Amino acid sequence: MARTGSNGRRAKRRAARRGGAPVPRLGLALGAGAARGFAHVGILRGLAELGIEPVAVAGTSMGALVGALYVGGGFADFEDWASHLTWRQIVRFFDVRLAGGGIVEGRRLMTFLEGLQPDRPIEELPKPFAAVATDFATGREVWIERGSWLAAVRASIALPGFLRPVEHGGRWLVDGGLVDPVPVAACRALGAETIIAVNVNGDLLPQRHGQWAANGGGEEGEELERLLPDLPRGLRELLQNLAGPLSGRGALTPRYFEVVYGAILIMQDRITRSRLAGDPPDLLLAPRVGEIGLFEFHRASEAVEEGYQTVMRARPALEALLGGRAVAALQR
C-alpha cells in the first residue's frame, strides 16, 4: 500500500508541474470466463489502438492468463495463436488424470504457455500484476503478487471439477472466479487509481436460458464421435464413459457439464453483481459473448473480435474517462 500512495503523489506532482489535472494511474481488471475470456485479447488490442496502456493488471482465471502474457511480453504470440485456434488443438492439452480433484492435469497447457513467455517471478515483470485464486480450505480470496507467474496463473484457472487444484504457498488453491470474478479490488491494491474492468459473463444468463430444449445435444454428440479417434487415450475413454450425460441424447435436459458449470456461472454472476456494486470500477466493459460456450475455445477468434468491437463502441466513454492529455501521458 505504501507503493500506491507514493506513486499517486508523484503523478500529482508531475501534473502540477505541467499545469493540469493529474494523469490517472490506469488499472485493468480482467474477469473470469473460460473460452469467453479470449475477449480480453480483443479488449487489449482495441485499447492499444486508442493509445491506452494500463500501468497495472489484475486478472481472475482466464483474465489472469491473458493479463500475465500481456504484462510479461508473450501477448503477441498468444494473440496470433488464438486467432487460428481449432478444437483439435485444444484437446491436445487435455492430459487426463482422474485422481487429484480434476479430470485434467494442466501440465501440457503450462508447458505451452512457458513456450510463449518464459517463467519468472511476478515482481520482475515490467508492470504490477496480480492473479486471483481461492483458498479451497477457507474460501478466502488470494491475491498472488509474487513468485512464478506461471504458478499464479495455474492456480487462478483451476476450475473445480475440470483442472485439478494447485498447492501454492502451503495452501490448496482453486479458480479465483469462485470469490472474485472481476478483480477490481486487487487492481486497486496494485496502485491503480482509475479502473477499467472487463466482465465477459455480463450477458450470459439471459442468452443461455432455454437453449437446452432447442438443441437437444445432437450436433455436439456427432462432433464428439468424429473427434474421438484423434483424442488422447485417457480423454477418449473418459468421454466414451460419459457419452450419454455429455450428449444429452434422449432427454431435453441440461447436459452433465452444463449442470456443473452452469451452477458455477450462476454463482459467479451473483457474486460479480454484488462486488461491483460495492466497489464499482470507473468503467465496465461487457463484451457480448454469452452465446460462446464455456469450453468452446475453438471460437476464440469470435471472442477476440467482439472484445475489440466492445472497445470501439466504448471509445466515447473511454475518452471522457481519460481525456486526450491523459491518454497521451499514459504512453510515455
Image: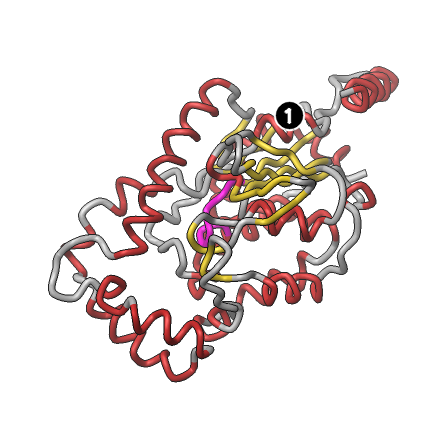
Q: Residue at x 42, y 52 (%)?
A: 161
Q: Quadrant of residue 274?
A: top left
313 inside magenta stretch:
no
Establish if 131 lies above or below 36. above
What quarter of the picture does the N terminus occupy?
Answer: top right
Q: Which residue is mark 1?
A: 194
Which amino acid lies under the numbered mark 1 shown in the image of this protein? Thr
Secondary-structure class at tag 1: strand
x, y (%) of residue 266? 33, 37
Q: Viewer-proximal residue, 29 or 144? A: 144
Span shown in magenta: 31-37
Q: Residue at x 47, y 71 (%)?
A: 91
Residue 54 visible in this rendered orientation of the protein: no
Q: Is residue 70 left or right of residue 281?
A: right
x, y (%) of residue 288? 39, 45
Q: Quadrant of residue 87?
A: bottom left
Q: Viewer-proximal residue, 212 or 283? A: 212
| Identity of the residue furthest to the bottom in this view | 229
What quarter of the picture does the C terminus occupy?
Answer: top right
